[in-house]
Amino acid sequence: MTPKRRRRLIFVVVLVTGIGTSVGLASYAFRQNLLYFYSPTQVAKGEAPVHHMFRVGGLVEKGSVHHDGLTVHFVVTDTAKTVPVVYTGLLPDLFRVGQGVVAQGRLNRNGVFMATEVLAKHDSTYMPPEVARALKKAHLRALEKAKEAEVAQK
């Protein structure tokens, strides 16, 4: 092998190794920071991972908010199923009963979502797209069940 070819081969090997390492590190970092969104119905079905970080969203159920110092207990619903949430910290100013929220955290073995962050909608017309889709799916499922019950009665 001539010295020129040898240098070229070393350059190509170093370049391919560097690119491969960069792609590997980038994909690892991406997987570590990827947060999936689940609706309360999906959490109730067991589709959400226990002890892994994810987001859950829906509406804050009426009569479910209880304050204990900085710790807040509330329930998030998609009108079909509910998920109890515990959050320690200051809630956003726009956090209210009946409003859309997205909570980020982990689900414990008891089925309680331990939130590390709570996001509230920012005006009267906005709803996070994930929450809107989850509520729409829950509403459509409820309509289907009502139709099935009506057909079964006939």
Image (cartoon, rainbow, N blue to C red):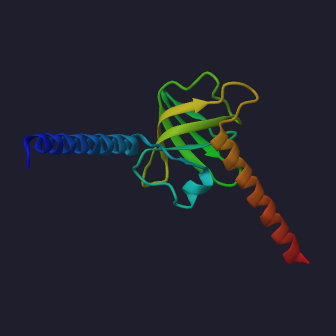
**Quarter where residue 144 is shown:** bottom right
The quarter of the rendered structure image containing the C terminus is bottom right
Question: Residue at left 84%, top 67%?
Answer: 147
In the image: residue 116, left or right of residue 99: left
Q: Is residue 91 above or below residue 102?
A: above
**Horizontal and vertical percent for residue 113?**
49, 45
**Horizontal and vertical percent for residue 149?**
83, 71
Q: Is residue 16 shown to the viewer in this render?
A: yes
Residue 18 versus residue 144: which sits nearer the camera? 18
Question: Residue at left 43%, top 44%?
Answer: 53
**Horizontal and vertical percent for residue 40?**
60, 51
Q: Is residue 45 above or below residue 65?
A: below
Residue at the far right: name it.
Answer: 154
In the image: residue 109, left or right of residue 45: left
Q: Is residue 30 above or below residue 144?
A: above
Please tell me how many numbered marks the rendered image carries. 0
Q: Is residue 60 shown to the viewer in this render?
A: no
Question: Residue at left 58%, top 39%?
Answer: 74
In the image: residue 107, left or right of residue 153: left
**Horizontal and vertical percent for residue 56?**
56, 44
Residue at the far top: name it.
Answer: 93
Question: Residue at left 74%, top 60%?
Answer: 141
Residue 22 versus residue 33: which sits nearer the camera? 22
